[in-house]
Image (cartoon, rainbow, N blue to C red):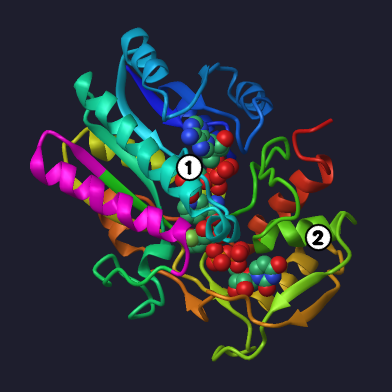
Amino acid sequence: MAILVTGGAGYIGSHTCVELLNAGYEVVVLDNLSNSSEKSLDRVKELTGKTVKFYKGDILDREILNEIFVNEKIESCIHFAGLKAVGESVAKPWEYYQNNIAGTLVLVDVMRQHNCKNIIFSSSATVYGDPAQIPITEECPKGQCTNPYGWTKSMLEQILMDIQKADSEWNVILLRYFNPIGAHKSGIMGENPNGVPNNLMPYVTQVAVGKLKELGVFGDDYATPDGTGIRDYIHVVDLAIGHVKAVQKVEENPGLKVYNLGTGHGYSVMDIIKNFEAANDIKIPYVVKDRRPGDIAICYCDPHKAKEELGWEAQYGIREMCEDAWRWQKNNPNGYEE
Ligand code: NAD
Ligand code: UFG
């Protein structure tokens, strides 16, 4: 039996393929490579000595999905495939709703036609909006998202919950990621953003490698100790291992489950700069800019539920996140491009 990993060539997907293969699972990847390179899957092979079966194609394409479910014995699906750039989603809402929502509806329809009713979905802390409480537990009410990307996550959570409610044969695990950063320790697999990065850590590493001049710190007047925004950064390998635990949970037929995947620790933008500088002995020049629209002051989770029910807990700290992000960037200044 195999695990179908949609979006498996991407940042979190490729790291998850490594952990699934190391745990003894067979892995089938479907990815249209719209935001990734097939080379990431070569690196998966290099790291594990095992191959994933790769289908280049789209989750909107019923034919290729049918082909996969006919050819492969798929037990569960980890569904990463989606567009994820917050700013782009404001400019291109139709594309985001079409790709993320319509794509997931097609995927789930083909899955049920082939009687595969186990799905682990990449959700996000963004569904909490401006959180009602800190640290954020899974019981915390979902909030108002500030962009179409966030709404696709919130709506897809609802859609998958409704599908599970109507048919109890479904097992649906919603994983709400906090802020994944870092890279595989080998330095041969990591985040490969297109163009100028939107997220903090890839921006920092591109400043460090000299591709960008300085970091803009988006606001220093938040109600936080140093005035900059606080997030729950989690090492991508820890996040990947969380998916293996979720696959194991699905084997218990849990019905619907929702888990936060974070460390439970909050770091400010200034903390990240200082930790990166200390871990790697590199100065990160920065300038303080205006707040970024839609940003919140503080977001970190209570990760206890995942510990109790999945037996999962983040192992890596901020130093390793900074060291590993830098090792990847330094060794691969242009990501997977030569
Ligand atoms: P990524 O862009 O690196 O990976 C997504 C992959 O999906 C890419 O390889 C892309 O080519 C593929 N894809 C997109 N649309 C597709 C389609 N229609 N058909 C087939 N493949 C398609 O992003 P990531 O950071 O690895 O994120 C993975 C998932 O986790 C996404 O759903 C994202 O929204 C979610 N998530 C990410 C973060 C984060 O900070 N990285 C936080 C919370 C949630
Ligand atoms: N920041 C800067 N400068 C930058 C980039 C970011 O100061 O150049 C700050 C932001 O203002 C924020 C913090 O760094 O305070 C983190 O910002 P990111 O863009 O890295 O991450 P976000 O918390 O804004 O959002 C990310 C993903 C979302 C996801 C969310 C929760 O982009 O898709 O984490 O998982 F929903």
- 126 and 61: which is toward the camera: 61
168 magenta-colored: yes
In this picture, residue 305 sits left or right of residue 8: left
User: Which secondary structure lies at badge 1?
Assistant: loop
Q: Residue furthest top?
A: 71
Residue at image position (61%, 25%) is 41
Residue on which disc 1 sits? 82
Q: Position of residue 2 (x, y in %)?
A: 36, 20
- 86 and 333: which is toward the camera: 86
Q: Amino acid at mark 1?
A: Gly
- Residue 280, disc: 2
Residue 39's quadrant in the figure? Answer: top right
151 magenta-colored: yes
Task: Note whether 26 is above or below 204 in the view shown.
Answer: above
Q: Main secondary structure of the magenta part?
A: helix
Asked if the beta carbon under badge 1 is closer than 8 A to the nearest atom of ligand 1, the reply is yes
Quadrant containing the N terminus in the rendered view: top left
Say if residue 42 shows up in the picture: yes
Residue at image position (12%, 33%) is 169
Q: Amino acid at mark 2?
A: Asn
Q: Position of residue 88 (x, y in %)?
A: 59, 55
**Magenta range:** 146-172
Q: Position of residue 108 (x, y in %)?
A: 28, 32
Say if residue 255 shows up in the picture: no
- Residue 14, disc: none
Cα–Cα span, label 1 and label 2: 32 Å
- The disc, 1 or 2, on the residue closer to the chain's N-terminal end is 1
Would you say the residues marked 1 and 2 are in contact, meaning their CB atoms lie under 8 Å apart? no
- 182 and 87: which is toward the camera: 87
Q: Residues within 10 Å of mark 2 (few under 14, many from 20)?
A: some
